């Protein structure tokens, strides 16, 4: 939300006599609209009440003015009306049938359009469009995200596959971007396009005469050969919509002819007219940025738990589908449906960006906690169901351990488990009895179990697991009664300030806390920067919650003081050094670790932030020289200038020196943050920002008031640093990202008979796929006996693969994805019925929409 629109209810009538002449259009389609923020400067309960009040007001005016057309979006808000006032909802249905209420958007809520993951954008349309189809008998052809603060270049492909061919938005405005058009073809990262229209001036106005709003709007429309324009009007933000005085003013202005012919209409009418005219709009290729750059980092917690919700739900769907198909465990359709709706609601463009009041985040925390709990409950049931079916013969001297891989590619990585051990010696073996190296690390529990009979201690161990794609692997802890097992010689060491294995040598600078040496040993290439480059930068942040008018936070500042470096692990399979630093009353602990034979560095960050109206950047300077940085987005990556500007991204950022002989690439992955910048080869992540909650300049902060500031207290996240040569391999980066953000699961198991082997993979064919990742595995919406698998190709080349789906009786699936393409297939349960493609609404593209019965509330 933006204060410029919030204050428009105080607008005064425009003096037509003194106004400068307005640009003349043949026709202006007047979109009566009530922008409703269900959460912003109020909690969701107030938004709920306002949804009812707004629809009541619209129904009353529709009955009074037979020419009036009212536009509604956000199916979550309509669902509130449906569940609380069924009779009012039926009136909405009748007016929709008559064409007097225009239902647009097709999404569950109007979300932030930069930060959610791809599958969240997919589910916005899946749930929103299917709600419309069920209750109104049709779907939306026009997307409406009026108020979000920027729009990802992945969106046009998503919209098109949701049967949306037109798109309206407001931000970024004409002064915030070099995109000069009002009406244009918007091409996404893959080349898919939708026709787009930037709403002129604002999406809402005050409740009185609309002449000044019209004047500003028509002056904002970019000059084109287009004889038509479109203007949104009506009281908004806290709902409301056009008032009776607004409509009277519209009729008066229409009679005067000052702005041409003013036609009450839904926004889809404008696109119908311009398409029929044969005019060809200009083209804009790429993202639509930037507005309110502070919202990429504001309120770290909401961003972290949103990401956890996304990842856990997708993991739960995957495992729940597997056990439903293989073991007959009921699929929790209703629970997942409710969880997705809750998750999507909390991606609203004033919740996820961090711009709502403090108590709204108490609500969001509780709601998203429920989403994560729902997902974890389903995942646990699925894994327990698989575990009970594995054949594990009795061996009283062992403790079986099961490791599960949720990914469609085999993984070899470290896992940790904490459990009770005897004081005797013990060893670890794989299913074939081969002895494996392990390492005892600090447990989470700081006491032994209170059981004098068993003499057990809580211990935590680390070992390397190798698990098939979408499968499991059994390991055994064995009690060694003869003599302690001989541990392997350390394949990784920590000495002084240096970590080293066969691939890497990493030395920590005790002055900065960043690396002074980062060497890939096989070719002796050092990625570290010249000495003295800052790793932590604290700056004053006088911007408001949104960061309005901020282009860059990459400003000079002061650094945390390194207080100590401590070796916390020293092999044989992982070595780690902890760097403890301080600034003011804030404390930072960073644990650098490398494992045996690995060429990546993990950095576990624990920050206790106590500063107000300040910002902390974690910087990753390097020896790489470049003027561009690559940012992961929902369907691939996008290149932006390394000019220090603040930009949104998904899980990784990457720089590459393509002109150097080694073509060094350095990538930083993380599991919590979204705000990045780059200055040359120096990458930055905004990890803490502490503005006052819901503060919008030019409002001044009173010195005698106590304000709550964001990001206070402890936050934890992990970065993964990936040095590569010869231009690097972003497909490897994608898999490392998936592994970090959704780690393998490990559990203890008992002995029992079963029909499943101790090692099993359930998908084959994607281990070496060029950038192809599984986005979702779930039952098909149209017929849950069928299974849907959605893939996305993150690479810039076409990929063809032959998959074998072990969880579907080894069904083959031939897939072909063009560069950066999303595709979904449905696999029927009958072996003699071929798989077929569906769109993102899960309908067959070559089939008409199924019949729906309106007014089925």
Image (cartoon, rainbow, N blue to C red):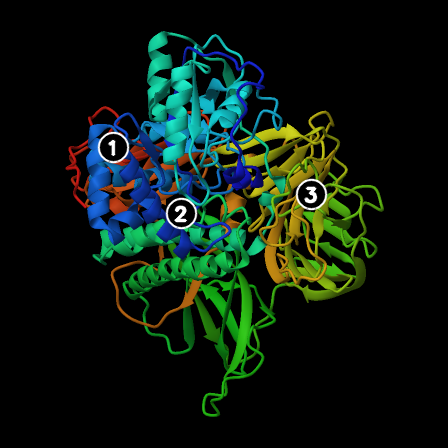
Q: CA distance from mark 2 to mark 1?
A: 21 Å
First in sequence, mark 2 or 3: give its number.
2
Front-most of residues 463 and 829: 829
Q: Are marks 2 and 3 in contact (CB under 8 Å)?
A: no
The answer to whether residue 181 shows anywhere in this view is no
Q: Which mark is residue 843?
A: 1
Disc 3 element:
strand
Disc 2 element:
helix
Position of 324 compared to 675: left or right?
left
The percent position of residue 812, horizontal first and vertical second, equals: 27, 36
Q: Are marks 1 and 3 in contact (CB under 8 Å)?
A: no
Position of 513 compared to 225: left or right?
right
Report the label total.
Answer: 3
Position of 395 compared to 574: left or right?
left
Residue 564 vertical position relative to residue 817 in the rendered view, above or below = below
Disc 1 element:
loop
Indicate which label's residue lies in the foreground, 2 or 1: 2
Q: Which mark is residue 684?
A: 3
Q: Which residue is disc 2 drawn over?
A: 344
């Amino acid at each position: 939300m933006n204060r410029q629109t919030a204050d428009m209810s105080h607008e005064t009538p425009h003096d037509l006599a003194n106004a400068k002449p307005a640009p003349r259009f043949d026709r202006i389609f007047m979109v009566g609209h009530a922008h409703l923020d269900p959460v912003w400067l109020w909690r969701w309960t107030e938004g709920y009440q306002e949804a009812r009040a707004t629809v009541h007001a619209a129904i009353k005016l529709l009955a009074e003015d037979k020419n009036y057309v009212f536009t509604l979006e956000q199916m979550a808000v309509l669902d509130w009306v449906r569940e609380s006032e069924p009779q009012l909802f039926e009136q909405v249905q009748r007016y929709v049938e008559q064409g007097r209420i225009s239902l647009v958007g097709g999404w569950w809520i109007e979300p932030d359009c930069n930060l959610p993951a791809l599958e969240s954008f997919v589910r916005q349309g899946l749930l929103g469009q299917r709600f419309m189809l069920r209750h109104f008998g049709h779907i939306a052809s026009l997307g409406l995200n009026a108020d979000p603060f920027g729009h990802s270049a992945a969106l046009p492909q998503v919209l098109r596959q949701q049967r949306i061919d037109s798109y309206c938005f407001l931000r970024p405005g004409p002064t915030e971007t070099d995109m000069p058009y009002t009406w244009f073809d918007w091409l996404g990262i893959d080349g898919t396009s939708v026709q787009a229209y930037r709403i002129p001036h604002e999406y809402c106005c005050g409740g009185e005469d609309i002449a000044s709003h019209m004047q500003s709007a028509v002056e904002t429309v970019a000059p084109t050969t287009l004889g038509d324009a479109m203007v949104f009007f009506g009281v908004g933000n806290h709902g409301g919509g056009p008032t009776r005085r607004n409509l009277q003013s519209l009729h008066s202005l229409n009679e005067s002819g000052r702005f041409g012919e003013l036609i009450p209409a839904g926004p889809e009418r404008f696109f119908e007219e311009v398409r029929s005219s044969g005019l060809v709009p200009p083209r804009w290729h790429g993202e639509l940025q930037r507005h309110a750059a502070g919202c990429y980092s504001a309120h770290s917690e909401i961003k972290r738990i949103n990401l956890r919700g996304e990842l856990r739900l997708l993991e739960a769907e995957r495992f729940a589908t597997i056990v439903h198909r293989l073991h007959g465990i009921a699929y929790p359709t209703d629970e997942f449906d409710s969880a997705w709706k809750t998750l999507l609601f909390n991606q609203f463009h004033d919740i996820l960006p961090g711009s709502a009041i403090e108590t709204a985040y108490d609500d969001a925390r509780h709601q998203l906690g429920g989403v994560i709990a729902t997902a974890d409950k389903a995942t646990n049931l699925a894994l327990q169901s698989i575990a009970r079916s594995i054949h594990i013969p009795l061996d009283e001297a062992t403790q079986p351990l099961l490791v599960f891989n949720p990914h469609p590619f085999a993984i070899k990585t470290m896992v940790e488990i904490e459990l009770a051990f005897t004081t005797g010696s013990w060893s670890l073996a794989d299913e074939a009895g081969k002895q494996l190296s392990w390492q005892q690390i600090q447990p989470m529990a700081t006491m032994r179990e209170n059981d004098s009979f068993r003499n057990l201690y809580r211990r935590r161990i680390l070992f390397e697991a190798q698990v098939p794609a979408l499968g499991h692997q059994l390991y055994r802890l064995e009690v060694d009664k003869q003599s302690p097992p001989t541990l392997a010689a350390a394949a990784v060491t920590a000495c002084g300030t240096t970590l080293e294995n066969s691939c890497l040598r990493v030395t920590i600078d005790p002055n900065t806390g960043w690396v002074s040496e980062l060497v890939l040993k096989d070719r002796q290439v050092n990625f570290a920067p010249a000495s003295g480059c800052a790793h932590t930068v604290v700056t004053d942040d006088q911007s408001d919650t949104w960061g309005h008018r901020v282009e860059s936070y990459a400003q000079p500042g002061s650094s945390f003081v390194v207080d100590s470096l401590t070796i916390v692990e020293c092999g044989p399979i992982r070595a780690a050094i902890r760097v403890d630093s301080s600034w003011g009353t804030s404390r930072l602990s960073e644990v650098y670790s490398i494992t045996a034979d690995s060429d990546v560095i993990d950095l576990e960050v624990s920050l206790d932030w106590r500063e107000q109206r300040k910002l902390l950047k974690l910087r990753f300077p390097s020896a790489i020289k470049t003027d561009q940085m690559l940012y992961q987005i929902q369907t691939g990556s996008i290149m932006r200038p390394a000019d220090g500007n603040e930009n949104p991204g998904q899980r990784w950022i990457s720089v590459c020196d393509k002109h150097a002989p080694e073509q060094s690439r350095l990538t930083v992955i993380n599991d919590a943050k979204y705000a990045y910048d780059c200055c040359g080869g120096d990458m930055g992540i905004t990890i803490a920002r502490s503005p006052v909650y819901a503060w919008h300049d030019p409002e001044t902060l009173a010195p005698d008031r106590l304000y709550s500031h964001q990001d206070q207290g402890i936050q934890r996240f992990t970065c993964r640093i990936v040095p590569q040569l010869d231009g690097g391999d972003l497909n490897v980066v994608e898999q490392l990202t998936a592994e970090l953000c959704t780690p393998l699961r490990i559990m203890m198991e008992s002995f029992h008979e079963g029909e499943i082997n101790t090692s099993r993979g359930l998908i084959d064919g994607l281990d070496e796929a060029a950038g192809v990742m599984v986005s979702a595995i779930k039952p098909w919406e149209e017929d849950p006996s069928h299974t849907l698998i959605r893939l996305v190709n993150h690479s810039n080349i076409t990929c063809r693969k032959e998959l074998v789906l072990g969880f579907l009786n080894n069904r083959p699936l031939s897939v072909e994805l063009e560069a950066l393409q999303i595709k979904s297939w449905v696999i029927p349960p009958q072996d003699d019925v071929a798989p077929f493609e569906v769109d993102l609404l899960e309908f067959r593209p070559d089939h008409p929409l199924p019949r729906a019965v309106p007014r089925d509330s």
